[in-house]
Image (spheres, grey):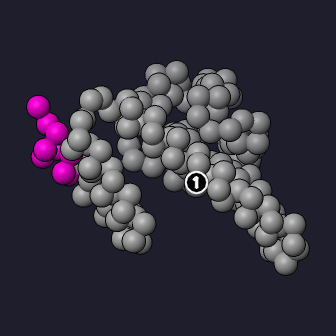
Amino acid sequence: MANVNILLELFWTFLKVNLLSTSGPASVGLLYHEAVGKFVTEQQFVQAVGFSSVLPGSDALQLAMYVGYAAHGFLGGLVALTASILPPTLIILGVTMILHRLRREAWISNFVEGLTPAIAVLMVFTAWKIFQKGGNTGWFGWSLALVSFLAMWFKLPERAVIILAGVVGIIFLSP
């Protein structure tokens, strides 16, 4: 019975943390308050945050699995992971169901059509800010930007264009 109580407590803790905070530093602070002394020691928690920060993937999910595993082994990690992914999964499913029902509504298509240019302009401004922060690249940097833009305009795979532009930048723009 004690095993079930620990698993229920793990589930409730991670469900609460993921319902009350967005991912990131806020969830780490809340999880620290909820988990240290109950499931893990402070030293274990600090190590878990360090490991989850350097490993690829979601920090919050890795931290949940670590704390759950420390509290109750593999099953604890699975319960903590399930409770962590449950709230965003249900929200996304709910929004998807609503949008699926409304997809034929004229105002939805108008809304999406209105978002498209705004997002495009936002992406251009973001790219411009990144380009400005890159320093003085001169004509070569402008040429690289223009060629990359044309490659994407002609529907070349975006990932390939970005990787190729980065490699060319490393080769030709390195001091």
Percent x, y of residue 168: 18, 51
Number of labelled discs? 1
The residue at 17%/44% (across/down) is: 170
**In the rendered structure, which amino acid carries the disc numbered 1?**
Ala
**What residue did someone put label 1 on?**
120
Identify the image quadrant of residue 100.
bottom right
* Lateral position of residue 34 relative to residue 74, left or right: right
Tell me which segment is drawn in magenta. Answer: 167-175
Q: Secondary structure at mark 1?
A: helix
Examine the rendering and report whether any part of residue 159 can be seen: no
From this view, report whether residue 63 is shown above or below residue 165. above
* Lateral position of residue 170 relative to residue 5, left or right: left
The residue at 38%/43% (across/down) is: 55
Q: Is residue 83 magenta?
A: no
Q: Is residue 173 magenta?
A: yes
The residue at 45%/43% (across/down) is: 127
The residue at 53%/48% (across/down) is: 123
- Near-viewer residue (169 or 3): 169
Examine the rendering and report whether any part of residue 94 can be seen: yes
- Near-viewer residue (28 or 141): 141
Identify the image quadrant of residue 162.
bottom left
* Lateral position of residue 32 relative to residue 16, left or right: left
From this view, report whether residue 38 is shown above or below residue 54. above
Percent x, y of residue 167: 20, 51
- Near-viewer residue (168 or 48): 168
Percent x, y of residue 1: 73, 49
